[in-house]
Image (spheres, helix red, strand yellow):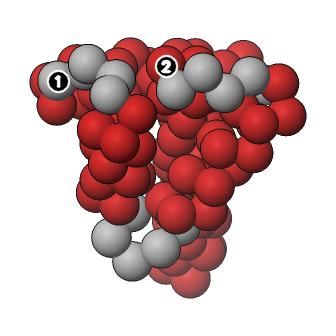
Amino acid sequence: MSLNDRGHDHEGRYAHDEERKFRIEARATKLLGLWAAGKLGKTGTDGEAYAAQLVNLDLGAAGPQDVFARIRADFDAAGVQQSDHQIERHRTECLEEAEKQVAAS
């Protein structure tokens, strides 16, 4: 294998890893959004729409910080009693589940 071939192989693996990471993050944000929507009393299409809004927000510059801030603000406005730690813990659980789902697909 030539040096050029190794470079192309490395680029291909890097692109694949980045795409996989993106899919895991997006799926985790959707799962987190569906959980948060349930806590806010949003079900069905309203819950799906809320989760989709969070996924779009996650694509922004700040990423997960924007999502956390939005959920925190929405919970506070609705009087939902969830600590920052509980939200972060649930995000971690969503990341683990998303990784399993992406690996299975």
Instruction: Give percent across and percent down for residue 9.
Output: 59, 64
Instruction: Give percent across and percent down for residue 65.
Output: 28, 57
Instruction: Give percent across and percent down for residue 20.
Output: 59, 46
Q: Is residue 63 left or right of residue 55?
A: left
Within-10-Å neighbours for mark 1: few <14, some 14–19, many 20+: few
What number is the disc on residue 97? none
Residue type at mark 2 is: Lys
Residue type at mark 1 is: Ser
Front residue of 92/66: it is 66
Residue pictured at 58% horizontal, 29% vertical:
37
In terms of image quadrants, where is residue 44? top right
Residue pictured at 47% horizontal, 73% vertical:
60
Task: Estimate the spatial distance between the alpha carbons at disc 1 and disc 2, rounded to whole Å.
Answer: 13 Å
Question: Number of labelled discs?
Answer: 2
Mark positioned earlier in the residue sequence (1 or 2) = 2
Rendered position, 26 above or below 99: below
Rendered position, 74 above or below 94: below
Front residue of 54/7: it is 54
Rendered position, 67 above or below 89: below
- Residue 68 at least partly seen: no
- Residue 72 at least partly seen: yes
Front residue of 64/13: it is 64
Instruction: Give percent across and percent down for residue 70.
Output: 38, 52
Q: Is residue 16 left or right of residue 65?
A: right
Q: Is residue 91 left or right of residue 33?
A: left
In this view, the residue farthest toward the bottom is 4
Rendered position, 45 above or below 71: above
What number is the disc on residue 83? 1
Dot 2 falls on a residue whose secondary structure is: helix
What number is the disc on residue 39? 2
Q: Quadrant of the N terminus?
A: bottom right
Dot 1 falls on a residue whose secondary structure is: loop
